[in-house]
């Protein structure tokens, strides 16, 4: 059966004297006996006992105890005799080097040392006398162990204060002395002690479980005590202070939390909490913080409170927290009714450690225009963000994937003009990059290894003996192809022509950057020679830029036969020069020739017909036209 002990204290020293004449006896006290404002019935639903040892009534008198609440008396009524107090004297006798053991019960108290001597005391127990050998500290040792400390053992191994030279130090054992420390060297000694303890006048009242059930959480009531003598003469009733039953153990109201810098932690309980007595303020010895895991360690702490409900822990740390630390608060707290709760709340520390750059890498190789290079940047923890990398050739790499992990992938695509003759490196990153706690990631830079960038596409110049865009009357032309860097995969099929033809047999490589071919025009008009972009590559694999050559071809005129026509009314002169009508000389084979006619015109004016006659040297005109075509 579990039990809870309550103390009812009557203020005053009034005793009831039995009255066999049935007269009314004196009251047991004029003041309420003390019960306390709040009680804890932890054994709710089980029997429990009440210790009424402090009730100042005489032995043999009858105590009645009744529980009341606002509805009146309960079903619980105790009635029984009050036991008398008693005194007992015990005797213990042991030879030196042994401990004396007594049998005082827990409800008793040592009240006197009746005899104590270490040496050779004489007589019998209860009638011992000090002999010729006696240690001066014999009584002092017994008094300290029994009266002061209320022990049941006097261990002779325990040292006693004082100097050895004055003969008052019992030393470590009674058997080890030197000089005056031993009251009688060379003589066997005994330690004999007689002491008296007193038991209280006690009555333990048991309240059955059926009555305990009335004491629910929040119950408010009081007890009424009555004392009568053995003949039934009743005393005046005495009423206890009212009390409230508290069955609720304290709990955590606001969880354990740490501040932003991990230098302070707080916790708030549902009510004021104390040490096990329900009233002494908690200290750092009862609520103990500890740290597990992580990089920071706890070197010291203090605890403070102003209301015994909210507690603040000032923490001194060694190292910087990385967020893996778990702060745990361990202890047992009690409310004022001594309901207790063992607590071990924990909280994770804030991460104050910034991510540290670990490495940067890409696949070795030579990269050309259009190639994508994936660069992996690694930190020592997961990072969040989409940064941009600055590269040593002035280009940038943009984020591709990996946010929320320790490795980010950024991509750089080579464009025309990008170059790095030796190897590519990363100089820095830009943009926001943090860990989950918001700590900014450390700087990232480094060589990517054997990564070479060739972003210069080969160019080609197409030339001939005729200037591009001009007219040629040549039956064939040599076309020359010149690249700005060596190539070994420019072939005949890379050439496209219009307005004429080329033959593979005429395709010649003078050197890795110079090639020729013979072009034969097929008709008068525009002729083109084209090498398309990407037709060939340089040694790195960059495709060429496109090239085109254009000229006009004209077949020379020859004077083999001709016809003439004339405007009505004109006269054709029979002279070595042939006279042509103007409308036939506006153009020949698409070439404008009219502006040239004045250079070869021989004109006469016929006043009679009011007409101008123009004579031309046809051969001169044709020669002039051919000359134009050859320009």
Image: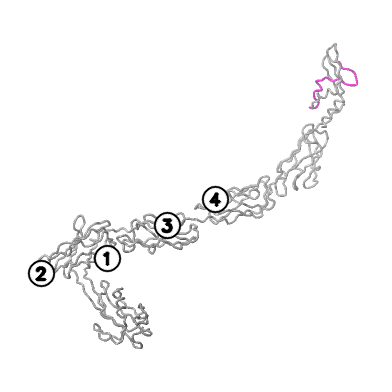
Q: How far apart are marks 2 and 4 (CA)?
A: 98 Å
Q: Closest to the observer: 36 or 139?
A: 139
Considering only order in the chain, which callout, 1 or 4, is on the residue closer to the N terminus?
1
The quadrant of the picture occupied by the C terminus is top right
Would residue 441 appear left or right of 592 to someone viewing this image? Answer: left
Q: Distance between the residues labelled 4 and 3?
A: 29 Å
| Residues drawn in magenta | 571-590
Residue designated by label 3:
265
Kindly indicate the quadrant of the structure image that contains residue 142: bottom left
Q: Mark 4: few, some, or many residues within 10 Å (few <14, many ≥20)?
A: many
Q: Which of marks 4 and 3 is nearer the N terminus?
A: 3
Q: Residues within 10 Å of mark 3 (few under 14, many from 20)?
A: many
Check disc 2 and report the residue beneath it. 20
Q: Residue 199 in the image: state x and y as whole percent.
A: 23, 73
Q: Where is residue 97 shown, x and y percent of the image?
A: 35, 82
SS for callout 1: loop
- Specify the label residue 433 is tagged with: 4
Is any part of residue 146 visible from this angle? yes
Does dot 3 land on a helix, a strand or a loop? strand
- Sequence-wise, which precedes: disc 2 or disc 1? 1
In front: mark 3 or mark 1?
3
- Real-space Cα distance between discs 4 and 1? 64 Å
């Amino acid at each position: 059966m579990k039990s809870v002990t309550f103390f009812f204290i009557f203020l005053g020293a009034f005793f009831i004297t039995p009255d066999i004449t049935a007269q009314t006896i004196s009251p047991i006290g004029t003041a309420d006996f003390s019960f306390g404002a709040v009680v804890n019935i932890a054994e709710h639903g089980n029997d429990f006992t009440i210790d009424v040892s402090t009730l100042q009534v005489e032995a043999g008198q009858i105590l009645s105890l009744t529980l009341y609440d606002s509805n009146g008396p309960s079903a619980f009524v105790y009635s029984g005799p009050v036991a008398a107090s008693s005194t007992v004297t015990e005797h213990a006798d042991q030879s030196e080097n042994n401990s004396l053991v007594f049998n005082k019960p827990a409800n008793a108290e040592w009240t006197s040392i009746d005899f104590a001597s270490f040496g050779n005391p004489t007589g019998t127990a209860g009638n011992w006398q000090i002999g010729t050998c006696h240690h001066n500290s014999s009584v002092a040792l017994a008094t300290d162990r029994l009266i002061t400390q209320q022990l049941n053992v006097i261990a002779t191994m325990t040292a006693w204060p004082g100097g050895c030279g004055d003969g008052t130090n019992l030393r470590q054992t009674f058997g080890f002395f030197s000089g005056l420390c031993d009251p009688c060297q060379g003589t066997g000694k005994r330690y004999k002690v007689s002491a008296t303890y007193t038991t209280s006048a006690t009555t333990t009242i048991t309240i059955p479980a059926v009555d305990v059930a009335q004491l629910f959480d929040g119950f408010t009531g009081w007890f009424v005590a009555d004392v009568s003598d053995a003949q039934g003469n009743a005393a005046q009733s005495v009423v206890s202070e009212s009390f409230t039953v508290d069955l609720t153990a304290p709990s955590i109201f606001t969880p354990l939390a740490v501040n932003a810098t991990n230098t302070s932690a707080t916790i708030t309980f549902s009510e004021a909490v104390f040490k096990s007595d329900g009233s002494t303020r908690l200290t750092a010895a009862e609520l103990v913080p500890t740290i597990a895991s992580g990089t920071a360690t706890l070197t010291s702490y203090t605890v403070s409170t102003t209301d015994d409900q909210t507690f603040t822990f000032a923490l001194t740390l060694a190292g910087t927290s990385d967020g893996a630390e778990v702060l745990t608060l361990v202890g047992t707290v009690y409310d004022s009714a001594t309901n207790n709760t063992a607590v071990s709340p924990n909280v994770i520390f804030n991460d104050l450690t910034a991510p540290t750059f670990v490495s940067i890498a890409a696949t070795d190789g030579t990269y050309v225009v259009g190639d994508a290079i994936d660069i992996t940047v690694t930190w020592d923890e997961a990072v969040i963000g989409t940064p941009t990398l600055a590269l040593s050739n002035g280009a940038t790499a943009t984020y591709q994937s990996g946010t929320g992990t320790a490795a980010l992938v950024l991509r750089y695509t080579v464009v025309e003009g990008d170059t790095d003759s030796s190897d590519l490196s990363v100089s820095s990153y830009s943009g926001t990059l943090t860990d989950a706690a918001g700590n900014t990631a450390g700087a990232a830079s480094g060589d990517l290894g054997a990564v070479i960038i060739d972003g210069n596409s080969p160019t080609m110049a197409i030339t001939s003996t005729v200037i591009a865009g001009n007219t040629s009357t040549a039956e064939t032309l040599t076309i020359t192809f010149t690249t700005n860097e060596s190539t070994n995969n420019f072939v005949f099929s890379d050439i496209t022509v219009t307005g004429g033809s080329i033959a593979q047999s005429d395709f010649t490589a003078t050197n890795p950057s110079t090639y020729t071919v013979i072009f034969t025009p097929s008709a008068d008009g525009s002729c083109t020679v084209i090498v398309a972009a990407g037709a060939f590559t340089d040694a790195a694999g960059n495709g060429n830029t496109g090239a085109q050559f254009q000229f006009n071809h004209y077949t020379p005129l020859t004077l083999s036969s001709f016809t003439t026509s004339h405007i009505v009314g004109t006269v054709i002169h029979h002279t070595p020069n042939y006279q042509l009508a103007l409308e036939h000389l506006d153009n020949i084979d698409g070439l404008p020739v009219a502006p040239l006619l004045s250079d070869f015109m021989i004109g006469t004016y016929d006043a009679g017909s009011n007409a101008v006659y123009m004579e031309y040297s046809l051969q001169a005109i044709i020669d002039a036209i051919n000359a134009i075509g050859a320009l």
